[in-house]
Amino acid sequence: MNVLVITEQVPVGTKSADLAGKVRVEAIPKSAVPDGALTTLDQQEGKVTAIGLEPGEQLLAARLVDPRDLAPGTVPVPDGLEEITLLLSPERILGGRLEAGDTVTIYSSFDKEDGQTGLLFHDVLITAVQKAPSASTNNTSSGSSEPAVEMPNGSAFITFARSDADASKLIFTAEFGKLWLAKQTDTTVKSTPPVTTYGGLY
């Protein structure tokens, strides 16, 4: 079965008209083609990508939406997932530098017994970020016109798209331990490190 496959990284919000040079037609066994896989960009005029797309993935109809559906500061939830919001302090979210549409790795850390830290998930999509306003926005410096580096101010509500089983693990860690987020890049190496304890730290 012929379907459209992404050939290069496509950022969220890309117009369907700009996808022509970023996809190719590829023959794939029907058993490996998910529902909604597109065979052509016809009838997709005026739409934009709801999330970032990666090379090699099949282009699904659900990935293209009306631009009005992309509310500022949010991205749609992929099919089959649900949203969960957690309140996290700046040092756990890269000093507040995360935005909707970013993909992160999430680590859990517990103080119980000897203490341990482990990797929970790779490729976690952030669908929304609600940040506290910076106190510096209401203050002006009378001594200098030089721009100052804005420091993290307060915590932020981070909303993730995840399965119900994964959401349960996130809630458990938020309730009884601590969560740390690491922003993924195009070249992030995704390994499966062992759980870190005092005994295995050095």
Image (cartoon, rainbow, N blue to C red):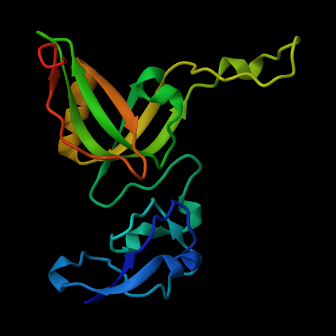
Where is residue 73? Give x, y as percent: 56, 46
Where is residue 158? Give x, y as percent: 43, 35
Res 102 seen here: yes
Q: Residue at x 52, y 80 (%)?
A: 21
The C terminus, quarter of image: top left
Q: Residue at x 20, y 36 (%)?
A: 168
Q: Residue at x 34, y 27 (%)?
A: 180
The answer to which of 15 and 5 lies nearer the viewer is 5
The answer to whether residue 115 is above or below residue 84 is above
The answer to whether residue 100 is above or below residue 143 is below
The answer to which of 39 and 5 lies nearer the viewer is 5
Where is residue 107? Give x, y as percent: 27, 31
Q: Residue at x 25, y 33 (%)?
A: 170
Res 89 seen here: no
Give residue 23's quadrant in the image.
Answer: bottom left
The answer to which of 82 and 118 lies nearer the viewer is 118
The answer to whether residue 8 is above or below residue 155 is below
The N terminus, quarter of image: bottom left
